[in-house]
Every structure is written in C-alpha cells, then in structure tokens.
Image (spheres, grey):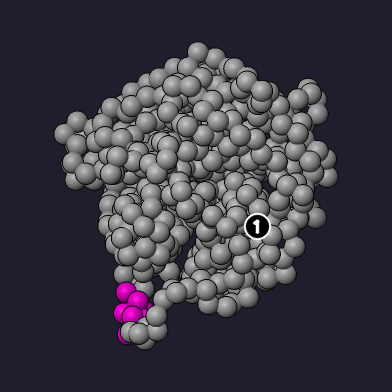
C-alpha cells in the first residue's frame, strides 16, 4: 500500500518541476539515498511576463497583444492577465527624481493609479486566439503578468508603441520579458545624442536590489550610483544610463544583475536623428552568436560586441543571405578585448537582400564567450528609423511573436548550420479569422525571409508560432513595419524558445514498497 507521505512527495516534486523547471526526487530508504531519475517533459504550470512602461510621450499609442499557442493537452483552465505595476519616478540610481513631470494633480493621479492597479489591462481567455488592448499617453504604466493552467505553456505578450513625431519618434516594439537575475545589453549609449533608459520591473511581493555596470571601448565606466538600485515590490524603475557616468560614449555594454530578487530588464534607446526603439537583452555569453532579420533595405548596420570573461575574443563575421554565407568587405573579423566593448560599422551590407549576421570563433577549438547586438537603420536624412537586433538563441521546440497585422510583417528564418524544416502557424485573429499553417525548408548557412500568410478572414491582429520539425537549429526574427509620414518605422523581435515545457524526473524506484 502506498503511503500518504509518498504520494505527496511525488505530487510535490512534479508540481515544483512544472513551475520552476527543476526538481530532485529523494526516496526514503537506507540512508535516505538520493536516486537519479530519467526526465520527461511536461508543460509548465505558471509563467510570468513583464512589460516596461512605454515612454514619456503624450503622442504615444500602445498596443498590447497576449497569446498562448493552442495545445493538444487539456489541462486546467487557468488565467493570463497583465496588470499595471505600481508607478515609479525616473531615477539616476540614487533615487533622485529626473522626470520633468509637474506636481499638479499628482496626488489625484496616484489615487486613480492605485484604484486601477489590480485591474487587468489585457486578459487572455483561451489558447490559440490573441487578446488585444490599447493604451495611450505618457503615463501608461509598466505591466506585470502571470499565466496559469493551460494558458501558461508558451505564453507570450508583445508591446508595440507608435510615436509619430517629437520626442522618441518611432515604432517601438518589445516582447515582454521573463524575470531573471542577469542581463547583457550591447549597443546602448551614453552619447549626448542618445537618451537611453534601463527599465527594471519587479514582479514579486518583496523589493529587488539591482546593480548596473557600464563598459565602453576602454573598459569599465566609473559609476558609483549604479549600485544597489532598489526596485519596489511589483513596481518598475526606469534609470537614465547617462546619469550613471560622466563619460559620453557612443557604444556601451550595459550589464544588469540583481543581488536580491529578480527583475525584467530592457533598454529604451532614443536618438535625436534616427528615432527610438527597445533594445532587448542578448542571449547569454557564448562563442557562436546569430542576429537574424536584417532588412533588405538597411542603410546602416552597426555591430557591437563584448567579452565578459578574462580572455579576448577573435571572431569571424559572416552575413547569411538568401543563397549562402558571405564575408562583409573589409570586415571579415572582429577582435574583442576582455571587458571592453568593440564595434564595427557594416554599412549597408545586405545590398538589397535580407540577411542575418553570424559570429563564430576565428580559430577552431578556441571559444570565448561574448554577447552582441546590431543597431540597424533604414532610410536617410530626416527619414531615418532605427531598430535593434540582439543575438538570440534558437527557436528550439517552439517560439512565438504576437502583434502581427494584415500588412507589414516579415518573418526571417536562419539556419547557421545544417538545413532545417519548420512549421509556421498564423493564429486566429483577435477579432476573427481561422489559423493558417505553412511549412518552410531553410537551407544551411542561409536566411529565408517570408511574408507570412495571414489567417483567412482576419480581423484584428494575430500571432506567429514557429516550431522546428527537422534538421539543424533555426534562429528567427519578425520585422514589423508601419509607414508614417514617408518614414518606414519598424521594429524587430527575435524568437527564442518559449520554454513552454520543462524536464520532470521520473522515479526509478517503486515507491509502493515504502511505508509510513
């Protein structure tokens, strides 16, 4: 007969693994020996996402899209809601208010914000169909979201903001982030022409404490105010990067870590000439990096890389285009000194064909971990627009990007090694329409850029889900373009694996023999 304690142990272990992705099963016995277990993959039971405050412009119009891919499994009904975080002032790291907002009406506004704090901005009702909400103005808050039950596996949310003119002009897009304790942001800046903010959002009920380190071409930028930044419970704090150091540097790598708690982190980068967009974190430091989705009409591409370890990195630089890999003229390699930010101007390297950038070690067998990102500009003169493409991990089993529209979406699929086949699902529309499924084969060392087939009878927006079916790893990105005033405003989001399943150990010991 199985004991009650044994059954509780099994249930608790499975639940822990499904929520956290980690569990160890220890069975009582002689010496309470820990037993190894084989792993099965189960859907996660809870997901958390954080969306930064859109910005300071009264002209901003923000669309939030929440989506969970349809699944064959049943599972509990669950919920998926994004609710406002508590408001926080802009800070320089020491808690000093750096905003230009007036005090008039502040008390009344705070009262309204407090009343609305628990009311969802967007609530997802079912898998396979996006939920959309719109907000406007400078005071749109950051959002904290949780999904449970069958809405948790693969849950994604997209925040897209249009600022047609003035401060922060551009189409700003970001996939809402998973909280973590370590983030790298190459391609930020403290130059006088830039206004870059690190947005830190805390999803938990206790305060988090974060540190921000800055690295330029000569190494660490001295800063005392970047240490010990408190992010209150369920709140968001934007930090103006240029206030953390007295040095004005064009290319800066930002490193965010937490000493207490966890945060979501993303950089809002704004330039006087080229507009603004969100810079998402690079994938964790590694020896080979892929930055997918460079538009065919890019007029300027700048690569920024950083080696966080003790060793320098020598990297090969290749463009993976429509027909294969090529070496950019005059820029076949990049030397990255340890703890220093390196950059090269690749100009209009795509030459009318979409592509992706691949960084690999110069010498076989010598791998030095690096992080990297691209600053991409389209247009010229006063009609320039900027977007950022961080190095990203492969699609893996499945990845999703939300907020696709009837026009303006391009999906880039890159196979840096062997050829691969992927399945792409355009979901049902948020206001109506039936999903469409297509399969694509991506040749090795190439980039395939496709205009997705929109759902039949589409009303509203839709999500794109990419699943790897066979072959080597695939990296993906979605470019969304909206033309305003003759300017191709655009934003690029990468599609890393959604982490919708976790490994759960299977017991190798028959616990039916255990007794109370």
Q: Residue at x 26, y 34 (%)?
A: 407
Quarter containing the C terminus: bottom right
Q: Which residues are magenta?
A: 108-116
Give x and y (percent) for residue 129: 27, 44
Q: Nearer the viewer, residue 63 or 463?
A: 63
Residue projecting furthest to the right? 310
Question: Looking at the image, which residue is at 73% across and 47% down?
Answer: 217
Residue located 72% across and 65% down the image: 223
| Vertical placement of residue 472 versus 495, above or below | above
Q: Nearer the viewer, residue 466 or 214?
A: 214
Q: How many marks?
A: 1
**Residue sitting farthest toward the front:** 381
Residue drawn at the location 73% of the way across and 58% of the way down? 221
462 lies left or right of 188: left
Would residue 370 be counted in the magenta stretch? Answer: no
Q: Position of residue 319 (x, y in %)?
A: 57, 23
From the viewer's perspective, tell me whether residue 212 is left or right of residue 338: left
- Is residue 324 visible to us here? yes
The residue positioned farthest toward the top in the image shown:
323
Main SS, magenta region, reads helix
- Residue receiving disc 1: 248
Task: Please determine whether, in this image, residue 453 is positioned above or below residue 179.
Answer: above
Tell me residue 55's x, y (percent): 41, 62
- Residue count near mark 1 (Cα–Cα under 10 Å), binned few <14, some 14–19, many ≥20: some
Q: Residue 226 sits in which quadrant?
A: bottom right
Q: Is residue 250 above or below residue 317?
A: below
- In the image, is 288 to the left or to the right of 65? right
């Amino acid at each position: 007969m199985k004991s009650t304690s044994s059954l509780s142990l099994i249930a608790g272990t499975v639940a822990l693994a499904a929520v956290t992705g980690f569990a160890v099963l220890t069975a009582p016995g002689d010496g309470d020996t820990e037993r190894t277990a084989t792993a099965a993959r189960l859907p996660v039971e809870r997901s958390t996402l954080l969306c930064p405050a859109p910005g300071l412009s009264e002209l901003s119009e923000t669309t939030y899209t929440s989506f969970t891919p349809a699944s064959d499994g049943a599972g509990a009904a669950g919920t998926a809601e994004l609710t406002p975080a508590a408001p926080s002032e802009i800070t320089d790291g020491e808690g000093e208010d750096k905003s230009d907002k007036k005090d008039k009406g502040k008390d009344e506004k705070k009262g309204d914000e407090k009343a609305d704090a628990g009311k969802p901005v967007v609530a997802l009702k079912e898998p396979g169909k996006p939920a959309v909400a719109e907000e406007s103005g400078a005071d749109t808050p950051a959002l904290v979201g949780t999904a449970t039950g069958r809405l948790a596996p693969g849950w994604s949310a997209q925040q897209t903001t249009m600022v047609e003119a003035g401060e922060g002009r551009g189409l700003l897009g970001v996939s809402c982030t998973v909280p973590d304790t370590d983030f790298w942001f190459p391609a930020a800046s403290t130059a006088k022409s830039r206004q870059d903010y690190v947005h830190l959002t805390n999803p938990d009920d206790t305060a988090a404490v974060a540190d921000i380190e800055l690295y330029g071409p000569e190494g660490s930028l001295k800063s005392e105010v970047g240490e010990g930044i408190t992010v209150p419970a369920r709140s968001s704090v934007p930090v103006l990067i240029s206030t953390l150091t007295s040095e004005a540097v064009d290319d800066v790598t930002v490193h965010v870590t937490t000493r207490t708690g966890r945060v979501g982190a993303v950089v809002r980068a704004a330039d006087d000439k080229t507009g603004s967009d969100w810079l998402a974190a690079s994938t964790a430091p590694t020896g080979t990096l892929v930055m997918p989705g460079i538009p065919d009409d890019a007029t300027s591409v700048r690569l920024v890389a950083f080696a966080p370890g003790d060793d320098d990195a020598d990297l090969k630089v290749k463009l993976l285009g429509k027909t294969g890999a090529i070496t950019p003229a005059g820029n076949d390699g990049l030397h990255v000194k340890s703890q220093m930010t390196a950059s090269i101007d690749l100009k209009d390297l795509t030459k009318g064909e979409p592509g992706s950038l691949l960084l690999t070690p110069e010498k076989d067998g010598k791998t030095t971990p690096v992080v990297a990102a691209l600053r991409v500009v389209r247009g010229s003169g006063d009609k320039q627009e900027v977007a950022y493409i961080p190095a990203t991990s492969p699609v893996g089993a499945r990845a999703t990007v939300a907020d696709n529209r009837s026009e303006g979406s391009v999906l880039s699929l890159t196979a840096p090694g062997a050829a691969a086949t992927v399945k792409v699902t355009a979901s049902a529309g948020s206001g109506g329409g039936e999903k469409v499924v297509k399969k694509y084969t991506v040749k090795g060392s190439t980039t395939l850029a496709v205009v997705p087939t929109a759902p039949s009878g589409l009303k509203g927006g839709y999500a794109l889900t990419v699943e790897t079916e066979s072959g080597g790893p695939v990296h993906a990105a979605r470019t969304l373009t909206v033309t305003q005033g003759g300017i191709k405003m655009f934003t690029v989001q990468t599609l890393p694996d959604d982490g919708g399943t976790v490994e759960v150990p299977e017991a190798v010991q028959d616990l039916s023999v255990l007794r109370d």
